[in-house]
Image (cartoon, rainbow, N blue to C red):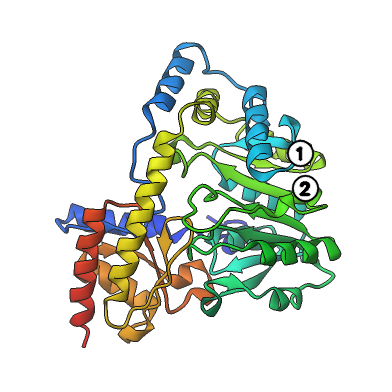
Amino acid sequence: MKLAKRMGRLGTETAFEVLAKARRLEAEGMDVIHLEIGEPDFDTPPNIVSAAAQALHGGFTHYGPSPGAPDLRERIAEEIRATRGISVTGDNVVVTPGGKPIMFFAILALVDEGDEVLYPNPGFPIYESMIRFVGGVPVPMRLHESRDFNVDVDEAAAQVTDRTKLMIINSPNNPCGSIIDRDALRALADMAADNDILVLSDEIYSRFLYEGEHHSVASFPGMRDRTIILDGFSKTYAMTGWRIGYGVMPQELVEPISRLVTNSVSCTASFTQAAAVEALDGPQDEALRIVDEFRKRRDVIVNGLNSIPGISCAMPKGAFYTFPNVEGTGLSSREFADSLLQQAGVACLAGESFGAFGRGHVRLSFANSTENIERALERMNRHVSGLG
């Protein structure tokens, strides 16, 4: 079968490929510790599950409006007003089946053939994949290990041309766990405003913050009208399988983005939207407990990694990933990740899965129990010791 040429430009998310490989090894009898997938290892809080069940029994089984249910859209706007300090209403919100569609639809709606898009590298691989898919030109903004995996704003500004249409930022960052501090974020906002660049701000990990405060680029003067905020419920409320996310955007983008929803998935499932309202309205104890648990795991995994010869690991300030440098082991990051899985039964991701500037690193998710993290560290230590 002859596929459309554009399919050759479409990448993937390596985490799911490695997960499938790890599952095959498990089926063959290997004990595998999963540090590859970015998914909280907690169940969805019971009050949210109950709200969804009640909604299903109450008839929430039909089509809904493409941009989302009005009550959820307004509740999300209320949350954004409180947490980002910007004036938005439900009319600025589009609800989608997960956060990825906001990336997909925003890039589809805004980027023409040949338009340039600045994006973080190392960064979530779907950014570059979607830019290439629509015919745009991906322009990597390097996250420097020497800067705690942050962008050099002057370096990024030098990459701007008259073809630059969009800038993607992600704080806290996947895979590095870094955050953009307020001063750097202000400088990026000024750069966007001065060059008439729109911004897609991926803030899906905003609640997973272990140091400092979360700042949104949309909160700076003039940026609300040129920023799309991407957020959702998957990470904060352990709702990855529910597929419920949203974008908060300038009013003129809501109709075209909603049209893309209509043309692709019609709408987001009605009962999951009822569950999302409960997630925001209900008790936040479990969400806060999850973050506290991740903070403890972060300390365990970073301290353990830094005790292994040949590995050095910066302390992530947010999200639930570490991005250690493994060059001292004498292996490439791809060789290290492959051998760690095949020989030691620990699944992680090679850094280049997140872009060319990720080489020399691997990503380890600490969305697993402390016991399993400690077991993984023991296996990694033995594995590295045996490399000589």
Q: Does residue 48 appear anywhere in the picture?
A: yes
**Circle 2 sits on which residue?**
224
Q: Are marks 2 and 1 in contact (CB under 8 Å)?
A: yes
Q: Nearer the viewer, residue 290 or 348?
A: 290
Which image quarter: residue 164? bottom right
Q: Is residue 122 above or below residue 73?
A: below
Outermost residue, front direction? 212
Give the residue type that dot 2 points to: Arg
Question: Is residue 62 left or right of 28 when viewed as pictured?
Answer: right
Secondary structure under the numbered disc 2 in the rendered image: helix
- Amino acid residing under circle 1: Ser
Mark 1 secondary-structure assignment: loop
Residue 299, x across and y down, in percent: 34, 62
Cα gap from disc 2 to disc 1, whole angstroms: 8 Å
Residue 142: x and y, percent?
Answer: 60, 74
Q: Is residue 302 left or right of residue 284?
A: left
* Left or right of 338 in this view: 74: right
Residue 195 shows in this picture? no
For label 2, the crowd category at 10 Å Cα-Cα, with few meaning under 14, some 14 to 19 and many 20 or more, is many
Residue 87 numbered tag: 1
- Mark sitting on residue 258: none
> Which residue sits at x=19%, y=61%?
375
Q: Which quadrant of the figure has residue 303?
A: bottom left
Query: Which residue is at a point 48% across and 41% down the rendered structure image?
Result: 234
Please give left or right for residue 103 compared with residue 283 in the image.
Answer: right
Tell me residue 150's x, y (percent). Answer: 58, 70
